[in-house]
Image (cartoon, rainbow, N blue to C red):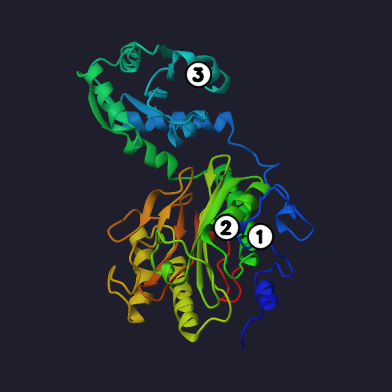
């Protein structure tokens, strides 16, 4: 039976709600009216509990223990998620160095442009050693001096994985007598195991994105463009108290996992694949939903149901101690047994089944063949097998998981059916 516009809205859980858009594109999201669902959204972040200074200090102490275990004398971390993780300092990246050195023994020290010192000191929660460099001076010499001041004269320095090459190279030239290695043995064990406070922030981010999805799906209309949809999703996230958005692909372009350069416009019978998230106190959500605008064909239903089965198989395999690759194998087997693939061949599942998530949208560890890392409590990752059929459509369902002592738990409940995207 064909779904009417009203029936379609009812299946999303937001019947009778529509975003006000013009034929030429989305109206200003800040302009609201009685039938604008965004005007009825309320912030979901007013009661969040940020990561405490005590927890950040515990992270630094854990990093120090790991450095000592791995014969690393200090770790260099530049601005970005790593700096925020250990110190709570948020700082955008530019060509100017803003970083922290965390020694295995001794106090941490920051490196900062001279004209930014007062701003940095406003943000510092941990430590008070700030080494400034003026515009005509070398920040690399400041880093080298920190190493010397901490008694590191012939030691080993760990570089955090997201450090840009030009910074590493500058430090290496300023202190060529030291050995430089990856800090992965320190940062991965720290960041891959999330604390209850981190999981709570991620849960709130997931909850917000699901609510934004409900508004977005209910707002689908004939002729809607991808950019129009993105505007609505950004406005919904903002109204819910977070910065985020949802990308969308329509029709045949849904077969490309990350979309096409072509701008498309929604029409009856299109598969609509949506993927997006937000951040709450730095922590990420990542959710995908796939629906059909109108009545799905039997082919669309069959592939959607196969995708759901593959996602369920990966979840069932998620047990403490199980290697990450087993989850990918479980999802892939469902798809291959149905006649797709094998391996990464299309039609089929052309990519890994999932990725780690936390402060960064993609973190360690990946659900991929060859990754024998065992699942452990506190690990968080996405479950998103995709079925791509070039020339027809693609289906992806994505929900994120966190591990507990007793097994896997979904942050968001998977879609019950192609007609009911939200549990």
Q: Earlier in the sequence, mark 2 or mark 3?
A: 3
Residue wearing tag 3: 127
Q: Is 137 situated above or below 316?
A: above
| Quadrant of the image occupied by residue 149 | top left
Q: Quadrant of the C terminus?
A: bottom right
Residue at (58%, 19%) from the top-left corner?
A: 122
Residue wearing tag 2: 228
Kindly identify which numbered label has been placed on residue 321.
none
| Quadrant of the image occupied by residue 164 | top left
Residue at (77%, 55%) from the top-left corner?
A: 33
Q: Residues within 10 Å of mark 2 (few under 14, many from 20)?
A: some
Q: Quadrant of the N terminus?
A: bottom right
Q: Is 262 situated above or below 10?
A: above
Q: Earlier in the sequence, mark 3 or mark 1?
A: 1
What is the distance, in whole Å, between disc 3 and disc 1 at their CAs?
A: 51 Å
Q: Is 265 situated above or below 174?
A: below
What is the distance, in whole Å, between disc 2 and disc 3 at their CAs?
A: 46 Å
The location of residue 167, given as percent across then percent down, is 31, 26
| Residue 13 horizontal side relative to residue 196, left or right | right
Residue at (67%, 44%) from the top-left corner?
A: 45
């Amino acid at each position: 039976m064909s779904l009417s516009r009203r029936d379609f809205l009812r299946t999303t859980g937001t019947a009778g709600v529509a975003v006000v858009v013009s034929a030429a594109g989305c109206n200003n999201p800040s302009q609201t009216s009685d039938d604008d669902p965004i005007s009825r959204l309320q912030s979901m972040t007013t009661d969040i509990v940020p990561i405490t200074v005590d927890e950040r200090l515990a992270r630094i102490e854990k990093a120090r223990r790991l450095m000592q275990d791995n014969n690393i004398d200090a770790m260099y971390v530049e601005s970005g998620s790593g700096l925020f993780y250990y110190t709570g300092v948020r700082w955008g990246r530019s060509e100017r160095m803003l970083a922290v050195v965390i020694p295995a023994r001794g106090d941490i020290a920051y490196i900062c442009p001279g004209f930014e010192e007062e701003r940095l000191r406003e943000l510092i929660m941990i430590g008070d050693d700030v080494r400034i460099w003026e515009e005509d001076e070398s920040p690399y010499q400041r880093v080298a001096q920190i190493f010397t001041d901490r008694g590191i004269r012939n030691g080993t320095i760990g570089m955090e994985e997201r450090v840009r090459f030009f910074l590493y190279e500058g430090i290496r030239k300023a202190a060529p007598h030291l050995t430089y290695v990856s800090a992965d043995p320190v940062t991965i064990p720290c960041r891959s195991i999330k604390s209850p406070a981190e999981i709570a922030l991620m849960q709130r981010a997931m909850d917000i994105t699901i609510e934004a999805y409900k508004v977005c799906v209910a707002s689908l209309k004939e002729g809607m463009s991808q950019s129009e949809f993105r505007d609505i999703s950004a406005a919904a996230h903002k109204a819910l108290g977070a910065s985020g958005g949802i990308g969308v692909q329509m029709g045949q372009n849904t077969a490309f996992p990350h979309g096409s350069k072509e701008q498309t416009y929604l029409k009856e019978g299109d598969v609509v694949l949506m993927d997006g998230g937000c951040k709450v106190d730095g922590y990420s959500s990542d959710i995908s939903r796939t629906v059909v605008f109108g009545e799905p064909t039997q082919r669309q239903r069959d592939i959607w149901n196969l995708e759901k089965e593959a996602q369920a198989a990966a979840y069932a395999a998620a047990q403490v101690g199980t290697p990450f690759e087993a989850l990918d194998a479980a999802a892939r087997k469902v798809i291959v047994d149905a006649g797709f693939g094998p391996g990464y061949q299309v039609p089929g599942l052309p990519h890994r089944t999932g990725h780690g998530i936390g402060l960064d949208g993609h973190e360690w560890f990946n659900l991929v063949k060859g990754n024998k890392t065992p699942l452990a409590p506190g690990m968080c990752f996405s479950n998103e097998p995709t079925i791509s059929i070039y020339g027809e459509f693609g289906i992806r369902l994505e929900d994120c998981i966190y591990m507990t002592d007793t097994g896997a738990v979904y942050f968001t409940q998977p879609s019950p059916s192609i007609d009911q995207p939200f549990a």
